[in-house]
Amino acid sequence: MNRRTFLDFLGKGAMVASLAPNILRAQQLFFQEFKGIRPSDEDELKLAKGLDYDVIIKWGDPINSKDFFGFNNDYTAFLPFDAAQPNDGILWVNHEYVDPFFVSDYAGEGEKTKEQVKKEQYNVGGSILRIKKNNAGKWALVPNDPLNKRITGQTKIPFNWDQPIAGKKAAMGTLANCSGGITPWGTILTCEENYDIFYGERNFKDGSLIEKRAFLAWHKQFDNPPEHYGWVVEVDPRTGKAQKHVALGRCAHECATVKELPDGRLVVYSGDDSVNECLYKFVSSEPGSLSKGTLYVANVRLGKWMSLDRSESPILQKLFKDQTEVLVRLREAARFVGGTGLDRPEDIEIDPINGNVLVSLTNNTGRENWFGSILKIQEEGGDYTALTFKPERYLAGGKDTGFACPDNMAFDTAGNLWFTSDISGSLMHKEPYTEFKNNGLFLVPRTGPKEGQVIQVASAPSDAELTGPFFAPDGKTLFISVQHPGEYSKSMEELTSHWPDGGDTIPKSSVVAISGDTLEAIQGIS
Ligand code: FEO
Ligand code: CA
Ligand code: CA
């Protein structure tokens, strides 16, 4: 693949080439035999036959003389330096939140010290890592590489916006970095999801601080405004430079999925992962711009994208003082223009073969939607700037399909869909989730005898969730984060997981590289 095709594959959701007939036949034969795995409740990363994993990096591992790898790794993105060198490049990893029990030694009573909060701040954000396959063919960190850097809850990050946000032009740090996306120019979009657990949220009506949502209580030691968080943050992994994109709005962004239009303008899809919250798309008005354009919210009942441009909306003009306020208070504004509350919109992927937009809807226990589904959106006429679309259920979780609570998704090089599950730790192994056991990784084959079926291919260690699946452009490695193993441990003496080191070690979130004959056979890689 040349560089451009390669970036197409990464950032633009370009069509994947159809497989040669002989490869297709081999792939079909493989699927006749392939069974995947049964749900498991073991404390290990279990993989289907013919898949292996190596741990690339674990929480606390040093990356250079002063920095170490953060906590609760989530979204990953691998950017090889060159298509000709697929085994050497930059791995970006999100760090979503902290468990004070492991990170800051905070026992849960009284006020945290400033030092404890600082420790926690350091452990969120993201990591930039140079990784390379070694002589044994295993992916490994290149220690002390000049590219290795941390972005944390303390890094100063400017807003890409003309007006200040809550009086300032820059924020202290990024946090709640859940899923993300990549741009056509090879930078990372890291998304601030449950930002309110750190500094709380502001009441829209009277401007008071809603402290009870700040259960990590960082606001007690740092008076950073809640308005500085909940953004899509762009990071250049070559320099570490970051900016917060105000035009994409502020909410619990799960991800940001970019489609580049033939004229160079961008469409960015993003879900607000909270119960009864909305799905958004930004359409830029200038090539390559993430600041000039229009933000829309989906009305899924009508199949319409509703504009959040205040200058076009009498109701927004009446209730919000300017466009900045509309973007900062996106959830409220979305309701006034007719956005539809969904069952927790999480990850979004664009099907590389037919161009459909898939959206994971994890669940909504309040509506007794326990198992979630994947929503398919077909933009009118296949035009990503269209204002109308056809929504349809693509796949439903449940006992028949064998999965519950879909979350992150990824398409492989043959257009097969892979997705992870996120049954909340508080509900796992309880009704109605008992039979699903631990969270897992699932595959939906595109062709062959198992086309459209759901096959479980991995099972996570105890209490963990598999997040951030990302295929290397050659399809030979699937990078994935194993997040929060042992999260429900009551004490150091009663750890619920010892993954990945085993014995009586403490559990550590880690990024792994999955490879093997099965991974290649699934994609018809000869
Ligand atoms: Fe951080 Fe919506 O998962
Ligand atoms: Ca997620
Ligand atoms: Ca999730």
Image: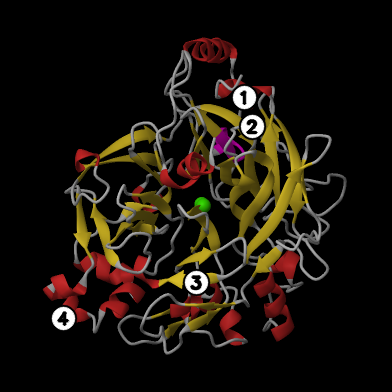
Residue type, label 2: Lys
Q: CA–CA distance between discs 2 and 1?
A: 6 Å
Q: Label 3's element?
A: strand
Marks 1/4: CA distance?
Answer: 57 Å
What amino acid type should be assigned to the residue bearing mark 3? Gln
Report the side of 432 relative to 496 (left or right): left
Three-letter amino acid code at the position of disc 4 = Lys
Q: Nearer the viewer, residue 51 or 27?
A: 27
Q: Are the two marked residues, 1 and 3, in contact with CB atoms closer than 8 angstroms?
A: no
Q: Secondary structure at mark 1?
A: helix
Q: Is residue 363 magenta?
A: no
Residue 507 position (above or below residue 54):
below
- In the rendered image, residue 24, in percent from the top left (x then y), is placed at 49, 14
Amino acid under label 1?
A: Glu
Q: Position of residue 142 (x, y in %)?
A: 78, 53
Labels 2 & 4 near each other (Cβ < 8 A):
no
Mark 1–mark 4 contact, CB under 8 Å? no
Q: Comparing marks 1 and 4, which lies closer to the viewer?
A: 1
Q: Which residue is mark 4?
A: 318
Residue at left offset 14%, top offset 70%: 312
What residue is disc 1 on? 520
Q: Earlier in the sequence, mark 4 or mark 3?
A: 3
Mark 4: few/some/many CA within 10 Å (<14, 14-19, 20+): few
Q: CA distance from mark 4 to mark 3?
A: 30 Å
Give the image location of residue 218, x and y in percent. Answer: 60, 80
Q: Is residue 438 magenta?
A: yes
Q: Residues within 10 Å of mark 2 (few under 14, many from 20)?
A: many
Q: Which mark is residue 476?
A: 2
Q: Which residue is mark 3?
A: 243
Q: CA distance from mark 2 to mark 3?
A: 32 Å
Instruction: Point out the stretch of residues depicted in magenta.
Output: 434-441
- The image quadrant of residue 46 is top right
